Image: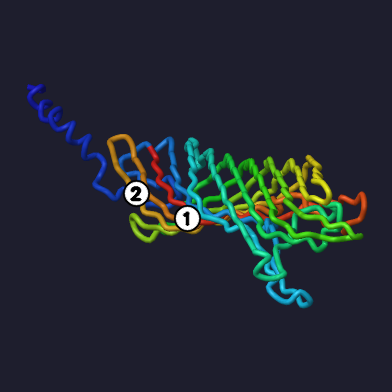
Amino acid sequence: MKAVFALPLLLTAPLAAETICPPPPPCAFLPVNRPCVKDICALEQSDLYIQLSFLYWLAEERGLEYCMKNTNALLDAQMTLYKPVFEWQPAFRLVLGSYLPKDNWSIDASYSFYLQNIRSAAKDNFSQGPFGLLSVWTSPDAFVSSNFYALWQRADTYWKLHGYFFDLMVRNNLCNSPALSIQPAFGLKMAILQQRYEVRYKFGNTITTTGVAENLISSSINLKNRSFNIGPSVACGTHWSLDGHWSFNGTIGGSILASNFGVGRHEFDVSSTAETQIGTYRFNDDFWTWRPQASLVLGAEWSDCACSPIKVIHYGLKASYEMQYWWKQNMMLRHIDAPIPQSHTLAPLQGDLIFQGLTVDLFFDF
């Protein structure tokens, strides 16, 4: 008799398991990745999360100007400065994270890669006027004669940047209200920034000093600038929920990085008097210093939850404007002295490097 009464309970048990979790929305989407789940069914929240990001960024660096051109009379010069034309490039980021057992803490590691290759050129035919291009990278005493009046018909540049970014962050999701959460974070940042910059000047004019005519053929300067950066990082994120699916978010962060720079310069100059004159020299340096870095992210997010009997799976899509500012990353060496014999004073440019553009994130908590 007891078996007869127990049979309906056994038949309805699978249905009860399927409906233990009420229909969506069971989640209040507060923090960036993990929702604060309403404990209706005592569900176990997600343990891991993954984020795939598509980046479409523009990288710009100060101090890469490569030539000047006079656009006015010779005795009333008005110079126009030429710099590389920076371009937008795609890149990617991968984030893997895990939630810690207590108090909404989580830890994640991210890897980002960015590659930039751009070529730029300027030209000025001597037949169009007594102007020409003025080099800003050639050594002041590169040729036999003083090159104060050296002019060129063409200048070409090639800038290559490889950026590798690694972040290890610990975060705490503070659900301050049904509409707002704050996410403080701290951790370690590491970045390897490899740069090569090539400048070519061709088809120069003829300089005459002390009765000797010197025809300028070419001047080539190859520069390298590699930095290894590592140090503590902090950030603070906010997440403002508009309704069950849409939200605005923003993050501001900064780092103080110990930076090791390896810089080098190789110059190769060719001219001719009675015979071809070739001059070349190399210079390399390696040093440690400190560099700050800052970042900003502003964006909008759509997310949703899928409930199962034992898990809540959170997924979503976020589009943001992201900016990273790296102070004094351009330490390429340029001459700053007058053409004094045996004077080869070089100084680093100390130009800032800026990344900015669109970041699209696809994330899952599972």
Q: Position of residue 159 (x, y in %)?
A: 62, 49
Local crowd size for mark 2, using a 10 Å CA cut-off: few (<14), some (14–19), many (≥20): many
Along the horizontal axis of the image, is 317 left or right of 171?
left
Residue 358's label in the rendered image is 1
Q: Position of residue 125 (x, y in %)?
A: 65, 64
Secondary structure of the residue carrying tag 2 is strand
Taking the spot 53% from the left edge, 39% from the top edge, the residue there is: 111
Taking the spot 74% from the left edge, 41% from the top edge, the residue there is: 262
Local crowd size for mark 1, using a 10 Å CA cut-off: few (<14), some (14–19), many (≥20): some
Cβ–Cβ under 8 Å for marks 2 and 1: no
Its colouring scheme is rainbow
Please identify the quadrant where the N terminus is shown: top left
> Which corner quadrant of the image does residue 177 belong to?
bottom left
Q: Position of residue 45 (x, y in %)?
A: 39, 39
Residue 27's label in the rendered image is 2
Q: Is residue 330 above or below residue 43?
A: below
Tell me the kind of residue under disc 1: Leu
Cα distance between the residues tagged 2 and 1: 28 Å
- Mark 1 or mark 2, which is nearer the start of the sequence? 2
Q: Is residue 17 above or below residue 193?
A: above
The answer to whether residue 251 shows anywhere in this view is: no
